[in-house]
Image: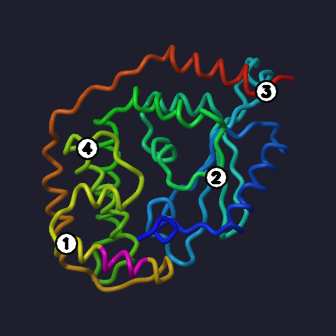
């Protein structure tokens, strides 16, 4: 399956997003360093009515950083049922990166990038690699899989997308346990590296085809093969292998913040 089939993005939608990002820069007097798609369109299993979840990292002018009290460091701008845009200020971003925040790491791995300043995404990715915590990522994804499994897959009729909301983090745990490094954002990459059973692959492929054809709220009967796999995988995941400790030097984050704030714009 081609990239645009797994991660649909029309030229018209891209232009709309770029216009909105430009308006945000003007309205808030900021510079967008990196903007990407998150959620189901980036994961690779969007429904026809899935919205667009645009996430970005931005930097203010120098004066913003020279205050006793820190101003708000998030921009949230829900526009419609189709398009939702939100971003994090750079210092907030780097603090989250130091904690190896899985959501931020996924943004940096998105297959759908709307904008990026030269070198910005590459430097953020390099820093993310330096501070990456396998233990933190594993805990995040395993907790997500357990929560979604308990909350959404216990009835005889379940929403199709909830299977994928359990499978994706569960395969991310498998990826980590196999020593493959940071889990990728795309479901296809996770699936290829962590599932080899032909029958299970066929079952998941059938679910993906269905998910891409029906609306987000569509329900269907429980799928016994997937249910059995999830229960077994959750049980296996209780045995955590030894994981490397995170590294990283905060001085490198400070350096990047200074260089970006001083170099990106001036008053």
Q: Where is residue 49 drawn, in percent x and y?
A: 57, 77
Residue at 73% in and 19% down? 262
Q: Which mark is residue 265?
A: 3
Query: Mark 4 = which residue?
Result: 176
Magenta residues (range): 205-211
Which of discs 2 and 1 lies nearer the camera? The answer is: 2
Quadrant where the image shows the N terminus = bottom left
Q: Look at the image and name its color scheme.
A: rainbow
- First of labels 2, 3 by sequence position: 2
Which of discs 3 and 4 lies nearer the camera? The answer is: 3
- First of labels 3, 4 by sequence position: 4
What's the CA distance linking mark 3 and mark 4? 39 Å
Pointer 1: residues within 10 angstroms few (<14), some, or many (20+)? some
Residue at 14% in and 56% down? 235
* Res. 187 image quadrant: bottom left
Query: Mark 1 = which residue?
Result: 200
Looking at the picture, tell me which residue is in the foreground, 45 or 241: 45
């Amino acid at each position: 399956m081609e990239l645009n089939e797994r991660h649909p993005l029309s030229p018209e939608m891209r232009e709309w997003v770029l216009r909105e990002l430009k308006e945000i820069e003007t309205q808030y007097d900021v510079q967008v360093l990196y903007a990407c798609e998150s959620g189901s369109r980036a994961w690779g299993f969007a429904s026809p009515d899935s919205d667009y979840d645009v996430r970005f990292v931005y930097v203010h002018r120098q004066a913003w950083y020279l205050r006793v009290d820190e101003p708000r460091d998030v921009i949230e701008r829900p526009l419609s049922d189709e398009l939702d845009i939100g971003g994090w200020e750079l210092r907030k971003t780097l603090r989250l990166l130091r904690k190896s925040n899985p959501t931020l790491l996924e943004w940096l791995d998105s297959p759908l990038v709307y904008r990026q300043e030269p070198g910005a995404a590459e430097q953020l990715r390099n820093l993310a690699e330096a501070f990456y915590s396998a233990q933190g990522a594993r805990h995040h994804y395993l907790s997500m899989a357990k929560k979604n499994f308990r909350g959404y897959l216990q009835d005889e009729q379940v929403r199709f997308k909830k299977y994928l909301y359990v499978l994706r983090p569960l395969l991310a745990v498998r990826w980590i346990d196999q020593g493959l490094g940071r889990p990728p954002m795309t479901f296809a990459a996770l699936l290829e590296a962590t599932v080899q059973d032909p029958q299970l692959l066929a079952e998941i492929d059938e679910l993906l085809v269905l998910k891409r054809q029906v609306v987000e709220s569509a329900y269907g009967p429980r799928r016994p093969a997937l249910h059995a796999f999830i229960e077994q995988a959750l049980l296996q995941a209780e045995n955590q292998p030894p994981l490397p400790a995170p590294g990283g030097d905060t001085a490198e984050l400070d350096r990047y913040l200074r260089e970006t704030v001083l170099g990106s714009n001036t008053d």
